[in-house]
Amino acid sequence: MARAAPLAAARPALLPAAAVVVAAGVSAWLASRYVALSVDANYSLAWGGELMRGRIPDLGAPELTTPHPLPILVAALLSPLGAPGASDAYGLLMVLAFGLLLYAAFRLSRALGGLAAALIAVVLVATRPRLDFFAAHGFVDVPFTALVLLAGASAAEAPRRNARRALALLAVAGVLRPEAWAFSLLFGAFVLLSPGQAPVGGRLRPLALAALAVAAPLAWLGFDVALTGDPAHSLAGTREGAVALARATGPEQLWPAFEVGIERLVGVPVAVAGVIVAAWGIAAGRGRRSAFALAAALVGAGVAAFAVLAYTALPLNDRYLLVPALGLACLASAGAGGFARRSPVPIAALVLALGGTLPGAVGDIRETASMLALSREKREADTDLERLLARPDVLARIDRCPRISASGSARAAAAALLERDPADIPISRSPVPPTGALAIGTAPSVRRGTPGVTRQGAWALVDRCSAAG
């Protein structure tokens, strides 16, 4: 009877949690219909499938995306579902990651400015068209940012008590993107070395925290060594990819890329408001001063990480600014806390943020709706590719042709569907291959009447292996 009492008391608390989980799952399943995975996500699916089949993929082949350890591991675990099923499940996880990002923004803003700030932050983050685009195409930056902001929220709520939890979240984020390594090391040093913040409990806990702080870089380097033999493979490959794709790189591109990225992600008024609220919170935040300092440090570390990319000749994509941009959005939302304290500075900053956002709200909604419609079309085209490469007549042609190529947009997905290494399917330079080869490309790129063509919706296969015979 003594044991039954705690269980009975816990049941009422479990019901709301279960309802939230079910609602989140159903919502994610419905929203996943609008997810069309990016080329990067499809490479992860192809490589994960290779690993699950006991084969090490060739990550050193030309014109490949940067491999990220955790997405590849997740893809490997999903591969028994088959390539189409794994793709659907991966898309579902990306929608759930977007939900986790909104929850992380809620938690961080609530720690800074209370419930009203948290609700404003959720609306502000959820309605950013560029962020919605990243979520709808399965970019790893969405779950990465969710984990980093959630770690920041845990630290802001209780730096000492939640240190292990925050570092664990950052460790997981660190096998999605390497910028989390800096966050882990900085926060680990803060907890271990700051006066009055050092953890208690003897040597074991400091050692455990230090291990968590360095776990992600060690795991990533070990991943590169295991699959390529080169601990710096990801760094070198990303640099080569930036050159091949003519991405913005170098110190001279840092400020233009930063300015454009912040404008596209959250807008300058929100960013400026976030800086103002951060300064106010650190100067006059009283009991929440340390929370504002940690949030500001998170933003600063994110900006510094972006600067490091510039000075190491790595690409300066706007999605690499998601952590500082959304951190500033949470800080701007925390201006709502100024109403309780009757402070005009955070209130004015919040008015600036909302005043700079609301006039474009209708345009943002239209942009997001248009993007989702295009994403749904791409998803339908992805289904066409699945159907094309499942046809017995097409598979027979592929099996007897030693030279197969595909367009850049189809290469990774075709490799996953055919259970091949993407390195074995080079990118085709022409929709019509040379004699003795076979190419997979978009249907509009192949002229009507071209010999050896098999069409399936948005895609076409051109077989010139038969011409060799």
Image (tube, rainbow, N blue to C red):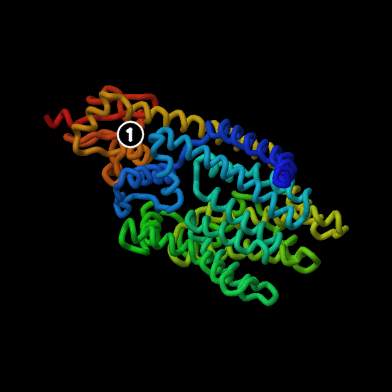
- Indicate the amino acid at tag 1: Gly
In the image, residue 119 above or below residue 368? below
Quarter of the figure with the N terminus: top right
Report the front residue among 168 and 242.
168
Query: Circle 1 — which element?
Result: strand
The percent position of residue 366, horizontal first and vertical second, equals: 63, 34
Q: Determine if residue 30 is in view.
A: yes
Please rate how many residues cluster around mark 1, counting C-alpha atoms within 10 Å: few if below 14, some from 14 to 19, many from 20: many
In this orientation, does residue 251 appear? no
Q: Residue furthest left?
A: 469
Q: Position of residue 314 (x, y in %)?
A: 44, 60
Q: Position of residue 119 (x, y in %)?
A: 74, 46
Which one is nearer the viewer's eye here, 165 or 100? 165
Q: Is residue 13 above or below residue 205?
A: above
Query: Residue 3, position in %: x, y?
Result: 70, 46
Measuring 39% from the left and 61% from the top, which residue is drawn there? 222
Q: Residue furthest front?
A: 1
Tag count: 1
Quadrant in the picture for residue 219: bottom left
Q: Is residue 327 left or right of residue 178?
A: right
Residue drawn at x 33%, y 34% is 441
User: Which image quarter holds the C terminus?
Assistant: top left
- Relative to the observer, which residue lies in front, 112 or 189? 189
* Residue that numbered label 1 is attached to: 441
- Give the answer, above or below, for where 463 lies relative to 356: above
